[in-house]
Amino acid sequence: MRFMVIVKASEASEAGVLPTPEEFEEMGKFNEELVDAGVLLAADGLQSSAKGARIYFDGDKKTVVDGPFTETKELIAGYWLVEMKSLEECVERFKRCPCPAPGQQTNIEIRQVFEADDFGENFTPERREAVERMRAKVAENS
């Protein structure tokens, strides 16, 4: 099972405050543990919402709103994409994660990623094949 572990933004991350060398070191060690365990698929931090935009959809109408966005606790500052046997394993592994916003109350959110079988029969063999072709193309591009 794949899980996305979402790091919530903080006032500091939204202000563009970068981690200290010690914080980089601590998080780097945790990331190395994930790599050594063979469970890390991807991970990145995100710049503040001031450098982003949202696209709101209302039927066919689309409205673009530039950042920054005000609800800091609802924003995302980074993520890991990991492969684990279960949600419980993922929770146990990420309980060892260093605090992503030292000195502040925060949380990380763990969400299971949809797999093809999760979509049932509406995800037709033709659609599965199209998705596999797209994934192969993405792999070629990386």
Image: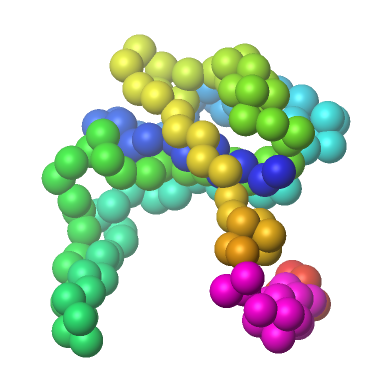
Q: Is residue 17 shown to the viewer in this render?
A: yes
Q: Is residue 125 above or below residue 96?
A: below
Q: Position of residue 44 (x, y in %)?
A: 56, 47
Q: Position of residue 79 (x, y in %)?
A: 52, 43
Residue 106: name its quadrant.
top left
- Camera-side residue of 82 and 118: 118
Residue drawn where x is 15% and y is 45% of the image: 70
For image coordinates 34% across by 37% down, the residue present is 9
Q: Is residue 34 left or right of residue 75?
A: right
Is residue 131 one of those drawn in magenta? Answer: yes
Looking at this view, is 56 or 28 the one in front?
56
Q: Is residue 33 left or right of residue 72?
A: right
Residue sitting at x 26%, y 34%: 73
Highlighted range, magenta? 121-136
Residue 138, above or below 24: below
Q: Is residue 30 visible from the viewing direction of this image?
A: no
State whether the magenta stretch is mostly helix, strand or loop. Answer: helix
Query: Residue 131: horizontal and vertical position, in percent?
Result: 68, 77
Residue at 27 percent across and 65 percent down: it is 53
Task: Point out the image quarter for the C terminus.
Answer: bottom right
In the picture, the quarter occupied by the N terminus is top right
The residue furthest front is 121
Q: How was this image coloured?
A: rainbow
Give the tally of numbered discs: 0
